């Protein structure tokens, strides 16, 4: 029989290979078990189904299950207790929970109990297979012990996320890590650019050598040049002995240069030579020294715009922009927020000996809906603050920071809402604030506001703000 004509025939699944994975689907609704069970079977997986938690535990004891997909709300043993018991029996089991938007607090609790990820109802078949693919990829990575297998496994060094936006970056990291090409990481502050730089290093052939980083915006020009290239004794006041530069220190490894856009023009010239000639000359020195280092640069500004403004060398731009990789802001990966919250709760309960607390469904909705201009870093700060200051085991809306409960408050920049302020005044002030936050970058502003760029342009023209332009 032609397998293409047989809907139940085993075939290549969405993970990209013939699967030997055994999936356990747990739900008290027969229709859910039948629909998704058939879908998984047709995709090439071996599938078992269970109507409740007790039946699922029995199957876990009898069979070698790769991934368990379970609902949370079930009679008898609920999904949370099932996750706890299942992970106690086998901590390598990957569990994906199915949850409604109203019970996102349960999703956070499940992640804390060891669940791998979650699917928010209603979800599509594509959502299901993507979640399953991620779980199986990680499981295979954990089971791989051969040198050949280890070379194919991506180590993401604590980067938390399961959204498509972040997984697209994961896939790109897997592609570029093994090359020696220079990479430019772009993205807003707080998105985790250094974490991704470390992930690239960890998956490269240089992984056993040093990862060295420097913030180009944190040092004055003279000191930055000395730190990068080193100096010889007597080259300037205070240079009492020769000093090896960080590019030499990172030899055979990876050198991460954050905020590269802040580098002064004279230092840009020396960096360009280092990239072109693969050699450096210390400050005050005359003899060049060969280096073998992979450069990863990062910026939170539009480097191409800096080139147009004459603030960044065009030849250096093309040298560092060999492979551009954009890290998405948190507002474009909202599905990762519950997982990140659960991770930060665990982190600070362990590190700071804080009491474990949960966020209520209402509080979680506020956290999910906020635009997070400070991205993952801002979310982590909010979680730490709430764990420290909250008085109850369940953190409600009243215990969230004011700017979350009333997002307009900081955007009004101290302005008082009164009867004389029109809705147009309020809208204009809000748009101006977001524009200023993004450096008048209209596309990013439109993303934050949740509107189409063309809608933003019309609003700017109507409000008399169309004269300022940066796309």
Image (cartoon, grey):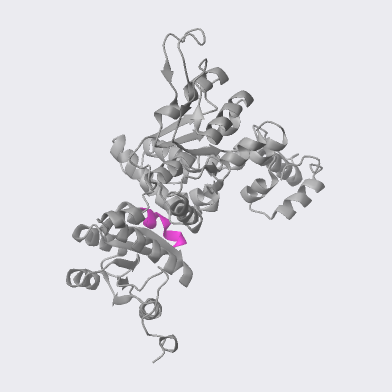
Q: Residue furthest front?
A: 287
> As drawn, is 252 to the left or to the right of 264?
left
> As drawn, is 82 to the left or to the right of 362?
left
Q: Quadrant of residue 348?
A: top left
Is 210 located above or below residue 52 in the figure? above
Q: Residue furthest bottom?
A: 1
Q: Position of residue 269 (x, y in %)?
A: 61, 28
> Which region shows up in magenta?
100-108
Q: Nearer the viewer, residue 398 or 14?
A: 14
Residue lying at 28% horizontally and 36% vertically, measured from the top left: 353
Q: How many dots with numbers?
A: 0
Residue lying at 74% horizontally and 54% vertically, measured from the top left: 454
- Verify whether residue 107 appears in magenta: yes
Q: Quadrant of residue 70?
A: bottom left
Quadrant of the image containing the C terminus: top right
Quadrant of the image containing the N terminus: bottom left
* Residue 124 visible (yes or no): no
Q: Nearer the viewer, residue 217 or 74?
A: 217
């Amino acid at each position: 029989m032609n397998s293409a004509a047989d809907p139940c025939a085993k075939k290549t699944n969405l993970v990209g290979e013939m699967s030997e994975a055994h999936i356990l689907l747990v739900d008290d609704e027969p229709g859910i078990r039948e629909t998704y069970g058939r879908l998984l079977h047709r995709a090439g997986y071996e599938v078992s189904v269970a109507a409740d938690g007790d039946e699922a535990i029995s199957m876990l004891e009898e069979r070698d299950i790769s991934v368990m997909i379970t609902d949370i709300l079930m009679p008898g043993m609920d999904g949370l207790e099932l996750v706890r018991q299942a992970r106690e029996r086998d901590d390598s089991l990957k569990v994906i929970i199915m949850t409604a938007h109203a019970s996102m607090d349960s999703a956070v609790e499940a992640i804390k109990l060891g669940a791998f990820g979650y699917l928010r109802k209603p979800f599509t078949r594509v959502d299901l297979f993507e979640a399953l693919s991620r779980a199986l990829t990680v499981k295979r990575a954990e089971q791989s012990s051969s040198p050949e297998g280890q070379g194919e496994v991506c180590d993401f060094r604590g980067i938390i996320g399961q959204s498509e936006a972040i997984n697209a970056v994961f896939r790109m990291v897997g592609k570029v890590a093994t090359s020696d090409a220079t990479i430019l990481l772009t993205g807003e502050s707080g998105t985790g650019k250094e974490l991704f730089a470390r992930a690239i290093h960890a998956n490269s052939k240089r992984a056993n050598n040093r990862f060295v980083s420097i913030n180009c915006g944190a040092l004055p020009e003279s000191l930055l040049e000395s730190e990068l290239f080193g100096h010889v004794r007597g080259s300037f006041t205070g240079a009492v002995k020769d000093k090896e530069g960080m590019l030499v220190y990172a030899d055979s490894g990876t050198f991460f240069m954050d905020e590269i856009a802040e580098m002064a023009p004279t230092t840009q010239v020396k960096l360009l030579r280092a990239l072109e000639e693969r050699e450096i000359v210390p400050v005050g020195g005359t003899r060049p020294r060969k280096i073998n280092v992979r450069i990863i640069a990062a910026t939170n500004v539009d480097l191409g715009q800096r080139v147009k403004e004459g603030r960044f060398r065009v030849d250096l731009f093309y040298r560092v922009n060999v492979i551009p990789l954009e890290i998405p802001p948190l507002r474009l990966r909202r599905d990762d927020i519950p997982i990140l919250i659960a991770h930060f709760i665990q982190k600070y309960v362990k590190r700071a000996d804080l009491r474990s607390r949960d966020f209520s469904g209402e509080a979680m909705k506020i956290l999910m809906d906020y635009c997070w201009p400070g991205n993952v870093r801002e979310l982590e700060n909010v979680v730490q603050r709430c764990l420290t200051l909250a008085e109850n085991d369940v953190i409600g809306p009243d215990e969230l920071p004011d700017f979350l409960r009333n997002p307009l408050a900081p955007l009004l920049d101290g302005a008082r809402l009164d009867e004389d302020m029109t809705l147009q005044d309020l809208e204009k002030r809000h748009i101006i604030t977001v524009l200023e936050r993004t450096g008048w970058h209209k596309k990013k502003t439109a993303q934050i506001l949740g509107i189409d760029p063309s809608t933003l342009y019309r609003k700017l023209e109507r409000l008399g703000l169309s004269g300022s332009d940066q796309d």
